[in-house]
Amino acid sequence: MSQKSPERIVIATRESRLALWQAEHIKARLEALYPGCRVELLGMTTRGDQILDRPLAKVGGKGLFVKELETALLDGRADIAVHSMKDVPMEMGAEFALPCICAREVPLDAFVSNRWESLADMPPGAVVGTSSLRRESQIHAQYPFLAVTSLRGNLDTRLRKLDEGQYDAIILAAAGLTRLGMGERIRSVMPAEVSLPSAGQGALGIECLASRADIIACLQPLVDAETTACVIAERAVARALAGSCEVPLGAYAIMREGRLWLRGFVARPDGSEIVRAEREGDPAEADALGRALAEALRAQGAEAILADIG
């Protein structure tokens, strides 16, 4: 390694099973890169983990999952924080940096049910659980005969609620189930045409203080260039449209023959109106591509939808 091997790295992480898996995964990769380095976890409970009786959109959005971790970075208790990129707010404080986005797991949504194979198989009135307005709006638009209700809690809690019969099916990120070795619970992976993913879904990001040049340097071997370009483009769409839990918005990019293919949508929560657009371009221009897609969505009516929701 060209940079000096760090002696100790402390990772701030939420204490859910999935968050701990993600932190342990990064810990193992750092230990493999720097055998002399002590890598430790600092487990924390965030506001997003504590407030489970209301939808995230009603209590402050996804930023509730990162604020406590960022405080640990600021006061020196931790050197880095590991996040699911879909949980990272689109706007970050100037004191923070996101120097590393790792290779992506399957970024699509998973249909999980003990009775049915897909949304299309479900009878009228069947209950689908999801914590996401993005997913809810797409279900309403395509399957208006289904009932969609809020589902909060960590992965194990959500699966337990399904198994208890509170829901006929639930929609989860396929990446989380796969990472925890629970892929057998996935009845089907939902195509992007049915459920376009959230910006950054399936990707892990590592945050640190912008002033920590030493940490930024040691994280560079973990960066995945293709995933980074895709996530930058997706987040640019959401940032330009003020995307958060409070807006039913999806953005999904893939590499296709060396080009970045980006799709996005904005919808009303009840699915009564949905506007879609797509763009293709140079991955080196990922941020500009995302902003261009946001403008295309605005031109099709996204502005009016966002104004009404806001």
Image (spheres, rainbow, N blue to C red):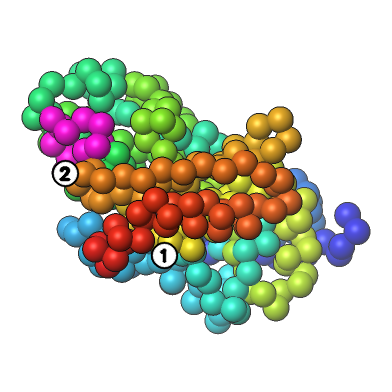
Q: Nearer the viewer, residue 219 or 62?
A: 62
Q: Nearer the viewer, residue 177 or 147?
A: 147
Residue 257, percent from left and from top: 71, 30
Q: Quadrant of residue 124?
A: top left
Q: Nearer the viewer, residue 2 or 169?
A: 169
Q: Residue at x 52, y 34 (%)?
A: 106
Left or right, 40 with reference to 42: right
Q: Which mark is residue 182?
A: none
Helix or strand or loop: what does disc 2 sit on? strand
Residue 286, percent from left and from top: 65, 52
Amino acid identity at mark 2:
Thr
Residue 96, percent from left and from top: 60, 73
Q: Residue at x 76, y 56 (%)?
A: 220
Q: Quadrant of the N terminus?
A: bottom right
Amino acid identity at mark 1:
Ala
Helix or strand or loop: what does disc 1 sit on? loop
Q: Quadrant of the C terminus?
A: bottom left
Q: Is residue 268 magenta?
A: no
Q: Identify the residue under disc 2.
A: 149
Residue 64, percent from left and from top: 37, 66
Q: Nearer the viewer, residue 217 or 249?
A: 249
Q: Is residue 124 visible?
A: yes
| Pointer 1 local density, CA inside 10 Å: few below 14, some 14–19, many at least 20 | some
Left or right, 35 with reference to 116: right
Earlier along the polypeptide chain: callout 2 or callout 1? 2
Q: Identify the residue under disc 1.
A: 242
Q: Residue at x 50, y 69 (%)?
A: 91
